[in-house]
Amino acid sequence: MILSGRAKLAGVVGWPVGHSLSPRLHGFWLEQHGIDGAYLPLAVAPERIQSTLRSLADMGFRGLNVTIPHKQAALALCDDVAPLAARIGAVNTLIFEDGRFKGDNTDAFGFLENLRQGAPVWDPAAGPALILGAGGAARAVAVALLDAGVPEVRLANRTAARAEALAADLGGAVAAVPWAARGAALDGVAVLANTTSLGMTGQPPLDLDLDALPAGALVTDIVYAPLETDLLGRARSRGNPAVDGLGMLLHQARPGFEAWFGVAPEVTAELRAFVLAT
Ligand code: ATR
């Protein structure tokens, strides 16, 4: 891609950032739409995040994606924070406009869009959800499910206090269940989401008995390396619909791309294949 002096600039700030798939993903869309623009991987140490964001904005960047470990710091630096990002407590998308930092969180959107595309028959109102985990990803997933109309959210986390704190924070429809009772907590659910790192390449396996999982309940995993986790494979083999985690990453990128580059991009099979071919 040949850039002009007016090229629109965006990127992802993280520490480290070398593992990020976002430059490839946005690069695909830039190429596809013939946009005079670039999306760069930007390694920024935590102690330099504030000054670097200011410099990038001063240099004309349209905005940035924000990844680990900067999502909370980015929220604190924003002039305007979208209500959803405030509830999630993290910003993953920054838009620089008129000298102001606008912060949003598109992880909940990405999570839901992935389910809508991958399992169009799933009705959020159909029944309770069980979420495994209580970290930042669990928070975005819980908010997404509640806002979509899921009537009850159960949270199971190894460290019970984190699940209890998240449940207390999100309110009435969310309840913590003991980690040891995670299999039994599948009783009656319409959706199961793993937001822990268990099952990821190099991490321990996810030990979860699926016997109590209702037939027809949707299963999803935010882990996408491997794409087909043991959880998804076991769910599919007993006939449950299952949606892998790559789509969440692809869909969460859409609002930022549109804001920075002015084109609403699509998540297609071709994009998935391109991003996976690394
Ligand atoms: P993120 O922000 O991506 O959600 P995180 O805050 O580090 O990342 O959360 C990782 C999740 O995986 C947590 O729910 C963590 O459980 P704890 O809160 O008990 O740490 C969960 N997790 C990681 N390793 C685990 C393991 N070996 N067994 C059970 N849960 C694990």
Image: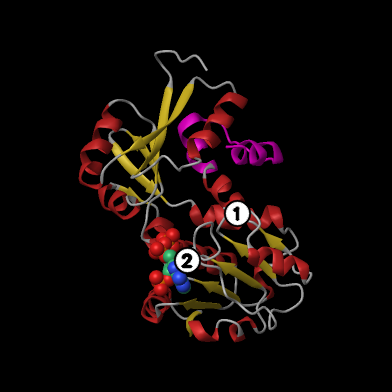
Q: Is residue 235 left or right of residue 44?
A: right
In the rendered image of this protein, does residue 123 appear above or below residue 45? below
Is residue 134 at all visible to an observer of this figure? no
| Callout 2–callout 1 Cβ contact below 8 Å | no
Q: Earlier in the sequence, mark 2 or mark 1?
A: 2
Query: Residue at the spot x=51%, y=41% of the render?
Result: 21
Q: At label 1, which amino acid type do we have? A: Pro
Query: Dot 1: within a 10 Å radius of its alpha carbon, few (fewer than 14), some, or many (20 or more) residues?
Result: few
Query: Residue at the spot x=28%, y=38% of the render?
Result: 53
Q: At label 2, which amino acid type do we have? A: Ala
Query: Mark 1 = which residue?
Result: 226
Predominant SS of the magenta segment: helix
Query: Residue at the spot x=69%, y=79% of the render?
Result: 213
Q: Is residue 103 left or right of residue 155?
A: left
Is residue 277 at all visible to an observer of this figure? yes
Query: Mark 2 = which residue?
Result: 138
Asked which secondary structure carries label 1, the reply is loop
In the rendered image of this protein, does residue 48 appear above or below residue 91? above
| Cβ at disc 2 under 8 Å from ligand 1 | yes
Asked which secondary structure carries label 2, the reply is helix
Q: Is residue 142 left or right of residue 81?
A: right
- Tell me the magenta residue range: 254-278
Q: Quadrant of ligand 1?
A: bottom left
In the rendered image of this protein, does residue 159 appear above or below residue 80? below
Query: Dot 2: within a 10 Å radius of its alpha carbon, few (fewer than 14), some, or many (20 or more) residues?
Result: many
Q: Nearer the viewer, mark 2 or mark 1?
A: 1
Instruction: Please state, as top left, top right, bottom left or bottom right, where the C terminus lies in the image.
Output: top right
